[in-house]
Image (cartoon, grey):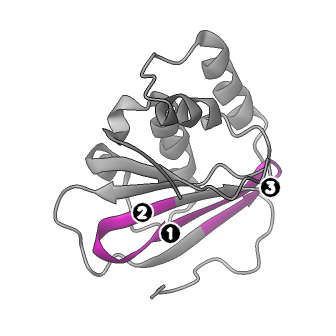
């Protein structure tokens, strides 16, 4: 995992908007949009794959220990899996799509560049969700991860 300066997720508007659109796709998700305000971005996957945009966050308030497991959404534009790990660690695993709309924002944050997203980046985010279609996924809840 590539470490980045700890930054509140509210300072990463593209990631926030992405998650606000993904979370409602799963009505069995035990994580709500209000909880996003309490996440701090702490890292990005360092696997080097072009189709990976996985990020790791830490919940800065008291963590509900019952909130564990993984919830996935398989789409025509990649696979999104939300992992709820121990001690308030939250991971957004985004794979199998080279153009995840928040990827450039994370790259900027890696270099301590806190400029606001461009209109073009917001358009990319809008297009992503405009053409997003859910596809069948056989395994949905992966259960607790230790």
Where in the figure is residue 52, as x and y percent of width and height? 71, 52
Can you say which quadrant of the picture contains the C terminus? bottom left
Q: Nearer the viewer, residue 41 or 30?
A: 41
The residue tagged 2 is: 90
**Disc nearer the start of the sequence (3/2):** 2
> What secondary structure characterizes most of the magenta part?
strand
Label 1 CA crowd tier, 10 Å (few <14, some 14–19, many 20+): many
Residues at discs 2 and 1 in contact (Cβ within 8 Å): yes
Q: Nearer the viewer, residue 67 or 8?
A: 8
Q: Please tell me whether residue 75 belongs to the stretch shown in magenta.
A: yes
Q: Secondary structure at mark 1?
A: strand
Q: Is residue 67 above or below residue 57?
A: below
Disc 3 target residue = 96
- On the image, which quarter does residue 46 sit in? bottom right
Which element type, helix, strand or loop, lies under badge 2? strand
Asked if the residue under mark 2 is in contact with the one under mark 3, i.e. CB atoms within 8 Å, the reply is: no
Residue highlighted by disc 1 = 83
Residue 30, quarter of the rendered image:
bottom left
Query: At which x and y percent is residue 143?
Result: 51, 86
Please give the name of the residue rendered at 73% of the width and 53% of the height, measured from the top-left corner: 48
Dots 1 and 3: beta carbons under 8 Å? no
Which residues make up the magenta segment? Answer: 72-91
Q: Is residue 74 left or right of residue 53?
A: right
In whole angstroms, how far apart are the C-alphas of marks 2 and 1? 6 Å
Q: Residue at x 51, y 63 (%)?
A: 27
User: Residue 123 placed where, x, y %?
Assistant: 67, 19
Q: Is residue 101 left or right of residue 31?
A: right
In reply to whether residue 4 is colored magenta, the answer given is no
At 66% from the left edge and 34% from the top edge, which residue is drawn? 101
**Taking the image as drawn, is residue 28 in sight?**
no
């Amino acid at each position: 995992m590539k470490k980045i300066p700890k930054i509140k997720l509210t300072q990463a508007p593209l990631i926030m908007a992405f998650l606000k659109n993904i979370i409602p796709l799963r009505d069995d998700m035990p994580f709500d949009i209000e909880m996003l305000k309490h996440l701090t971005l702490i890292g990005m996957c360092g696997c080097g794959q072009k189709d990976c945009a996985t990020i790791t966050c830490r919940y800065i308030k008291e963590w509900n220990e019952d909130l564990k497991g993984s919830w996935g959404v398989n789409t025509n534009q990649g696979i999104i899996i939300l992992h709820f790990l121990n001690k308030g660690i939250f991971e957004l695993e985004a794979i199998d799509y080279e153009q995840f709309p928040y990827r450039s924002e994370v790259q900027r944050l890696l270099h301590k560049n806190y400029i606001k997203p461009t209109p073009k980046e917001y358009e990319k985010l809008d297009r992503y969700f405009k053409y997003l279609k859910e596809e069948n996924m056989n395994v949905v809840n992966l259960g607790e991860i230790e």
